[in-house]
Amino acid sequence: MGGVARPASGSGPGAGADLETAGSAVGSGSGDGAGPAAGADLVVGSVGSAAESDSGAGADLETESAGSAVGSGSVTGSAGPATDGDVPAWLAGLGIPGLIDLHTHFLPDRVLRKVWAYFDQAHTHYGVEWPIHYRHPEPTRLRMLRDLGVTTFAPLVYPHKPGMAAWLNDWALDFGRRTPGAVPTATMFPEPGAHDSLAAAVEAGARCVKVHVQVGGFDPRDPLLDPAWGLLAEAGIPAVVHCGHGPLRGDHTGLEVFAEVLARHPRLVAVLAHAGMPEYDEALRMVEKYPRVHLDTTMVGVTFSEKMSPLPPDWPARLADLGDRVVLGTDFPNIPYPYAEQLAAIAGWAAADDRLGASFLRAVLHDTPGRLLGVLS
Ligand SMILES: [Zn+2]
């Protein structure tokens, strides 16, 4: 369906999505918001509601079965956290020392307000309402992450047009250095100097890079980016790549496009944002083919997304051999539901297949993202 996705303008670069994006704001001013789409990071893809009926199907998060989200049914007793307040005790019960979230978003306030304004119009952009659940001042948002037990997180930024990447990198590097728990991050855009700008950020300590193909409206195969991909592959720095069609298609979205980048840079530590939503099958195939490709959980399996881009019913089983290739991501704070809901969805997968279980949860929520960000030995 539509809604979500694909405005006529699909072509537009869209401004913004992921939140951040919007960024437009940044500096520019004007036009920005303009972009059609912008959109969200999210995921959505297609359509409609299928699931609706089961209302709960999805996540019952609040209850016990979280798992449900998966679709696979079955899960019983997965008991993920019902509320954000339950998260610390849930982690303690699992023996997990804290959450490491590889996909969150922080921005200068002025920019973030524009992003939130975009989501306020989500029904127009995506066909669904998108009430930002964590619409709070920055100090409050940081405290909420700490209260959830998030010990480390990657605050991601990304440009939707030329001339923004270096500015965003400066901000993100500074934010990462001065904010407890945050790691310095960077982004890139196909423009002259892209490699040098990224190299400077890496030299300055960036530990994670966000690349937003849909919001940026660029081709990840652009020759201007080739040396930058090479740099990341060489350095082993994870690149969180939003290259899927959700929630809005872009001129260069689609995992088959990004697959060509991987073919040229097979050692790239690529983290497919939203697990490739809605192209989950293709994402799994890329993980199987390239040993350094990972999936992030951002918005995957929660009720909100299941209505539009449901996971395949055998999702948990298909993760059985890929347990160390999945990392926690959430899109905090720009999500239309509580953080605990994402954790409950993941808990549901863990409970749905005996090969996953507690060891899978520890890997996803802590060990693997910690390894990618270089904060664990
Ligand atoms: Zn995001």
Image (cartoon, grey):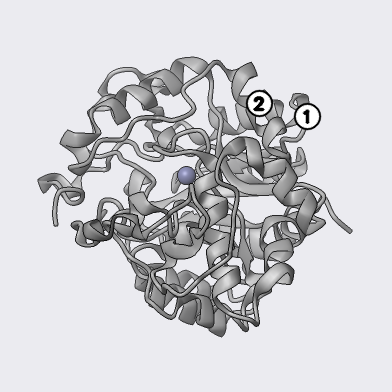
Q: Is residue 345 above or below residue 186?
A: below
Instruction: Looking at the image, tell me whether mark 2 or mark 1 is earlier in sequence order.
Output: 2
- The residue pinned by badge 1 equals 180
Q: Percent position (x, y) of residue 245?
A: 30, 59
Q: Is residue 272 above or below residue 123?
A: below
Between 302 and 265, the residue placed more toward the observer is 302
Residue 27 appears left or right of 125 = right
Could you tell me if the residues under marks 2 and 1 are in contact, i.e. CB atoms within 8 Å?
A: yes
Q: Is residue 139 above or below residue 58?
A: above
Residue 334 appears left or right of 105 = left
Picture disc at residue 142: 2
Residue ID at (77%, 58%): 94
Q: Distance from label 2 to label 1 (Cα)?
A: 9 Å
Image quadrant where residue 151 sits = top right
Q: Amino acid at mark 2?
A: Leu
Picture disc at residue 218: none
Q: Amino acid at mark 1?
A: Pro
Which mark lies nearer to you, 2 or 1?
A: 2
